[in-house]
Amino acid sequence: MQHWIYLIPILVIAYMFWSRRSASATDLQGLLVKGAQIVDVRTKAEFQSQSHPRSINIPLDQLGDKLKSLDKTKPVLVCCASGARSGVAVGILKKAGFSDVANIGAWTRIASLVS
């Protein structure tokens, strides 16, 4: 009878993954047309080793302190190495009042969308 209670944690985890999913290529193209800012939240060393020329580096652990360097009126595309840190960054940005934010996932994904 009480087996349904075990579904609650599964549903919560599923929602977390769904809400932090990477944006589709179509969504990303639309945001880029609007002049989106590309924020790479990898560490400085990761960013310096390889990055996209249009992206700016704000490591995830510094994002909260550097929110003022971003324009809230423009969309923000967030990337990292795999999509995990950028998913966390999306939550931070939305909580700070950024409304048009998308998770690119891996930073290499932006290369096919931006020249």
Image (spheres, rainbow, N blue to C red):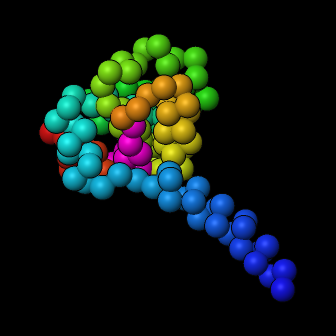
What residue is rendered at 43% in x and 14% in y? 69
On the image, the x and y values in percent for residue 38 come to 33, 32
What residue is rendered at 71% in x and 73% in y? 7
What residue is rendered at 26% in x and 46% in y? 28
Region rendered in magenta = 101-108
Looking at the picture, tell me which residue is in the foreground, 39 or 108: 39
Q: Quick check: 8 above or below 20? A: below
Q: Hey, which residue is sitting farthest bottom in the picture?
A: 1
Q: Quick check: 80 above or below 66? A: below
Q: Is residue 61 magenta?
A: no
What residue is rendered at 44% in x and 28% in y? 98
On the image, the x and y values in percent for residue 86 come to 49, 42
**Tally of numbered discs:** 0
Left or right? Give the position of 91 relative to 50.
right
On the image, the x and y values in percent for residue 107 come to 37, 45
Q: Which quarter of the rendering shows the N terminus?
A: bottom right
Residue 28 appearing in the image = yes
Left or right? Give the position of 54 relative to 41.
left
